[in-house]
Image (spheres, rainbow, N blue to C red):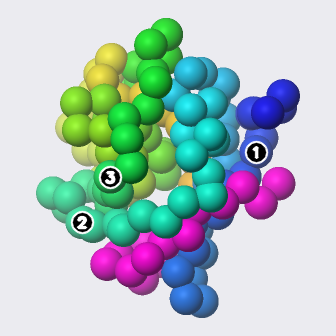
Amino acid sequence: MDQVVGTVVRFSAGSTSVEVTIDEDNPAVRDFFSMLPLTLTLEEFAGREKIAYLPRELAHAGSPGSDPEDGDLIYYVPWGNIGFYYNTAGIGYSDQTIHLGTYDASLDQLEQLEGQDVIVEVVR
């Protein structure tokens, strides 16, 4: 994939979908794309994020850490999961938290994806 930044990835289950705009070009993002399309299951984590475990860890060497903000989709290196952050209060920079993209969706929309088979695919 030549143009990574600006690519939109859709997470959908039933009539609900959340679109993530990729705004970083790093090894983790490129490896994430290599897995698509795929099906994941989202779950609640700690009142802060909705997480999903990938089929395998991402190749992330050379990917920068981040200081996550609400609305970020991140990859968490130690657990090999992605996370939709919605409550980052008190969370600071970590080189284990790799920024993948940003989303504009309500907590209600994220909750509608929980516990279902979520299809993840590139839409544009």
| Tags 3 and 2 touching, CB below 8 Å | no
Disc 3: CA contacts within 10 A as few (<14), some (14-19) or many (>=20)? some
Looking at marks 3 and 1 on the same chain, the residue that comes earlier in the sequence is marked by 1
Which mark, by number, is residue 27?
A: none
Looking at marks 3 and 2 on the same chain, the residue that comes earlier in the sequence is marked by 2
Q: Which amino acid does label 1 sit on?
A: Thr
Residue bearing the label numbered 2: 44
- Could you say which is closer to the camera, residue 38 or residue 123? 38
Residue bearing the label numbered 1: 7
Residues shaded magenta: 105-124
- Residue reaching furthest to the top: 62
* 84 in relation to 25, above or below: below
Quadrant (top left, top right, bottom left, bottom right) of the N terminus? top right
- Residue reaching furthest to the bottom: 15
Secondary element type, mark 1: loop
Residue 49, how many percent across, how many down? 30, 56
